[in-house]
Image (tube, rainbow, N blue to C red):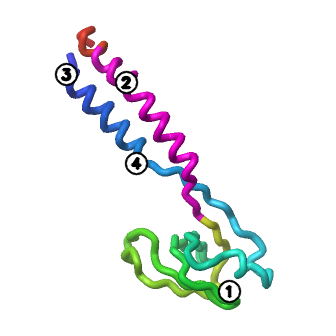
């Protein structure tokens, strides 16, 4: 027999995890060999750089030129802390993807979770009342 309080706590934790998730869109930027490539990215963008040796870094762009991209690490990694400076030559980059947080998708997910909370609570109460 399981404890209804434990079920309720588990459901609440699941809801909180869902609410904290933001919906992101990752869009590849093509034509890395094109001269206009650097103009597609601007300071303030968040991008994922994939190097020729398959390493990747997600950075917040601080500057872009025809020869390099500069920025800071977006999140702590095993080897670099958040905010660590990054300077990469375009010749060392295989692919670039822009990372954008979709406010509409995130808001929709949050509304869906909020609407689901009463149903989850009712299910927990009924599961506890049923003894199962």
Q: Answer with the quarter of the image where residue 7 lies.
A: top left
Mark found first going from the N terminus, 4 or 2:
4
Circles 2 and 1 in contact, beta carbons < 8 Å: no
Q: Which residue is mark 4?
A: 20
| The disc label shown at residue 13, or none | none
The answer to whether 32 appears left or right of 64 in the picture is right
Between tags 1 and 3, which lies in front? Answer: 3
Spatial separation of the CA atoms under disc 1 and disc 3: 59 Å
User: Residue 7 or 56: which is nearer the viewer?
Assistant: 7
Q: Which residue is mark 1?
A: 91
| The disc label shown at residue 118, or none | 2
Q: Which residue is mark 3?
A: 3
Q: Where is 1 relative to 15, above or below?
A: above
Residue 60 in picture, x, y percent from top left: 51, 74
| Viewport quadrant of the N terminus | top left
Near mark 3 (Cα within 10 A), the count class, few <14, some 14-19 or many ≥20, is few
Near mark 4 (Cα within 10 A), the count class, few <14, some 14-19 or many ≥20, is few
Residue for point 45% across, 29% down = 115
Residues shaded magenta: 99-125
């Amino acid at each position: 027999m399981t404890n209804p309080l434990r079920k309720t706590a588990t459901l609440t934790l699941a809801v909180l995890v869902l609410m904290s998730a933001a919906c992101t869109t990752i869009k590849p930027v093509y034509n890395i060999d094109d001269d206009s490539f650097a103009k597609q990215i601007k300071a303030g963008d968040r991008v994922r750089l994939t190097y020729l040796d398959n390493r990747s870094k997600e950075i917040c762009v601080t500057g872009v030129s025809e020869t390099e991209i500069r920025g800071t690490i977006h999140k702590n990694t095993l080897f670099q802390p958040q905010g660590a400076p990054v300077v990469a030559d375009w010749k060392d980059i295989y692919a670039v993807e822009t990372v954008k947080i979709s406010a509409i998708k995130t808001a929709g997910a949050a509304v869906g979770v909020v609407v689901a909370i009463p149903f989850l609570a009712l299910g927990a109460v009924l599961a506890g009342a049923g003894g199962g």
